[in-house]
Amino acid sequence: MASDRSSRRLMATACLAVTTSMALPVALPATTAHAEPKPSVSQVRKKLEKLNEQVEQLVEKYNQVSEDLKRAKKKLQATQKTSRDEELAFETLRNKVAQMAATAYKNGETGDVAGFISSDDPQAILDQSAVFSHLSRNRNSEVGQFLAATQRVRREKAQAQSAYDEVAAKAKDLKKQKATVDKSIKEQQKLLKKLGVKPDKPSSGGGGTYKGPASGSARVALNFAYSKLGTPYVYGGTGPNGYDCSGLTMRAWEAAGVNITRTTNSQYAATKRIAKSDLQPGDLVFFRNLGHVGLYVGNGKMLHAPRTGRNVEIVSITSGYYLSTYYGATRP
């Protein structure tokens, strides 16, 4: 009897559980997708500004590496020429040493010279240290010259080639980095266009003539720079059809007979520091930790080659972006 009552209670509990579970709503996973919020014009402009800064830094690094590459190439070419000259000297010395070896062999001084005189390879001869050890005891001067000539040319040539290859690899890597950033810039520019923003236009263009108070070499430099107003910015450009920032300042002062080198860093290092309050037309003005340079033209303005997609222009450095990123000034 008690068993029946227990069974009935269990069945009632089970039915209640099933009924309750059927009455409860089933929670389903949310399927509604939320679209990413569209960026504002100011956000896109800010990102574009950062990307342009990255490009300019890469351009200056590439310019420096390009200068290093030119020097490394000249050194390699010089060592290659020296190598050819040393090869001629090697041939002369080889004949002398070969004659010495043949004489030693005839005189029974050594049995290790067989095949020695027929070798045209400096290293093959150098490897025969036993022969040299014997010959050098009596003919130290000639053998010493021979060893020095062959060893020096091989060492210098290898060092020059290694230096050139290292710099060339850096240049290749910087090109890849710039290509990646350039792609991002184009994407941001397209996004600005979709948001209804028209591309920036330079404040002036079409060439011009400096009419300010500068004289001497500074005036010549400024006349050159003004004649380039409206010329496109070109990555790594040194003219005449396009310039980057340091390429323009270099050519402007070069026109005045003054060499201020190629890159922003080297231009800053090679010229005299001046206070911002002492700025005069023709001075170099630097921004973003030496990432950018322009020519001061007076009245709080500079002439510069800004960035890809822009032309050589004149802008204010007393407000906005160039005021906030000002680094320093120098005088050639």
Image (cartoon, grey):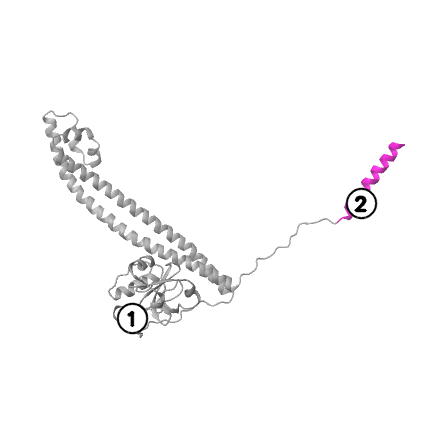
Residue plotted at (48% across, 61% down):
46
Q: Which residues are magenta?
A: 1-24
Residue 165 left/right relative to 85: right
Residue 272 position in % (x across, y down): 29, 62
Residue identifier under label 1: 223
* Mark 2 burial class by Cα count in 10 Å: few <14, some 14-19, many 20+: few
- Mark 1 residue type: Asn
Of discs 2 and 1, which sits in the foreground?
Answer: 1
Determine the residue located farthest toward the right in the rendered image.
Answer: 1
Residue plotted at (44% across, 58% down):
51
Residue plotted at (14% across, 38% down):
93
**Looking at the rendering, which quadrant does residue 313 occupy?**
bottom left
Q: Is residue 121 visible?
A: no
- As helix, strand or loop, the secondary structure at mark 2 comes to helix
* Placement of 277 over or under 167, stated as above or below: below
Residue 329 position in % (x across, y down): 34, 63
Q: CA distance from mark 2 to mark 1?
A: 94 Å
Taking depth in this image into account, of 65 and 259 the one nearest to the observer is 259
- Mark 2 residue type: Thr
- Magenta stretch contains residue 138: no
Residue identifier under label 2: 19
The quadrant in which the N terminus is found is top right
Q: Is residue 58 visible?
A: yes
Residue 19 position in % (x across, y down): 80, 45
Residue 6 left/right relative to 148: right
**Looking at the rendering, which quadrant does residue 252 occupy?**
bottom left
